[in-house]
Amino acid sequence: MTEGWVKSNMFCPRCGNLKIEQFTNNKPVADFFCSKCNNQYELKSKSGRLGGKVNDGAYNTMIERIKSDINPDFFFLSYEPEKQKVTSFVVVPKYFFVPNIIEEREPLAETARRAGWTGCNILLNAIPAQGRIFIIRNGVEENRETVITKLSRSRSLEIRDVEARGWLFDVLNCVNAIADDVFTLDKVYEYEPLLSAKHPGNNNIKAKIRQQLQLLRDKGYIEFLARGRYKKYEDVLK
Ligand SMILES: [Zn+2]
């Protein structure tokens, strides 16, 4: 039911093409494609609320896909089964996938048919807000042009090296979590313990934070006001 809905209702959020096509055979990594820009999409559907995490397949396969850069963009859809209504529809561009948004589940019990098999969850809440682009939010459709603009804007965050990208998103998540639009370097340093826990091998977290803030400035996400003072650009951080 959800695949049919996507096929008849979705446009391509990459190029604005009015429709997307469904792969006819069971493609290993994608469900839909755009015949105009050739971009591919994988659909994950969930009954009820979308929530913070979505079940996916084998953990190791997912990590391999992320590291080898072969993931398509993802659509996340949630629906109310009784009303046959789509409540949330989100596109996450492929470059927002980094290993730390993938949570390893408990291996299946010895008694299970596939004993020892380990699945994963995609942690939607760990993806920076800039990478969770709503097309339908609480049952209401977002403006199509806004969706395309947001996706296109997020492409500046596309860094090929997956580890470098992970760092950028970690610091972007900290910046997003700061309530004020104008903030100080010390405010970002407050996240040092959290970042340190995520990157136990790095013993100069503060330098890494400063480096990522420079990157976010170069990419037009924040502005340097004065020494140790920054400002978020409203259009890209809301
Ligand atoms: Zn397209």
Image (cartoon, helix red, strand yellow):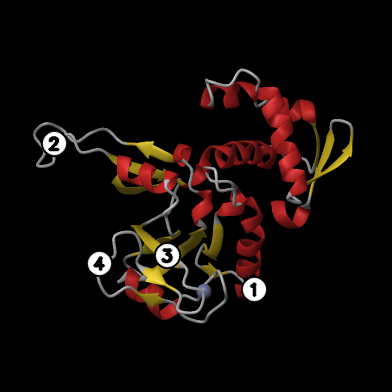
* Marked residue nearer the N-terminal end (3 or 2): 3
Secondary structure at numbered mark 3: strand
- Residue linked to disc 3: 41
Q: Which mark is residue 145?
A: 1
Residue lying farthest to the right in this orientation:
226
Q: Determine if the C-beta at disc 4 is less than 8 A from ligand 1.
A: no
Label 1–label 2 contact, CB within 8 A: no
| Residue at mark 1 to residue at mark 4: CA–CA distance | 31 Å
Q: Determine if the C-beta at disc 2 is less than 8 A from ligand 1.
A: no
Vertical placement of 194 versus 151: above or below?
Answer: above
Instruction: Tell me which amino acid carries mark 3.
Output: Tyr
Q: Which mark is residue 115?
A: 2
Secondary structure at numbered mark 1: helix
Vertical placement of 87 versus 110: above or below?
Answer: below
| Residue at mark 4 to residue at mark 2: CA–CA distance | 25 Å
| Residue at mark 1 to residue at mark 2: CA–CA distance | 47 Å
Q: Which mark is residue 26?
A: 4
Residue 227, percent across and down?
Answer: 89, 31
- Kindly identify the residue that appears in the image at 29 percent across and 65 percent down: 27
User: Which-is-in-front pick, marks 1 and 4?
Assistant: 4
User: Which-is-in-front pick, marks 3 and 1?
Assistant: 3
Task: Give the number of callouts.
Answer: 4
Toward which corner of the image does residue 87 lie, by quadrant?
bottom left
User: Which-is-in-front pick, marks 4 and 2?
Assistant: 4
* Marked residue nearer the N-terminal end (1 or 2): 2
* Marked residue nearer the N-terminal end (4 or 3): 4
Secondary structure at numbered mark 4: loop
Residue 179, percent across and down?
Answer: 72, 40
* Marked residue nearer the N-terminal end (4 or 2): 4
- Kindly identify the residue that appears in the image at 35 percent across and 60 percent down: 45
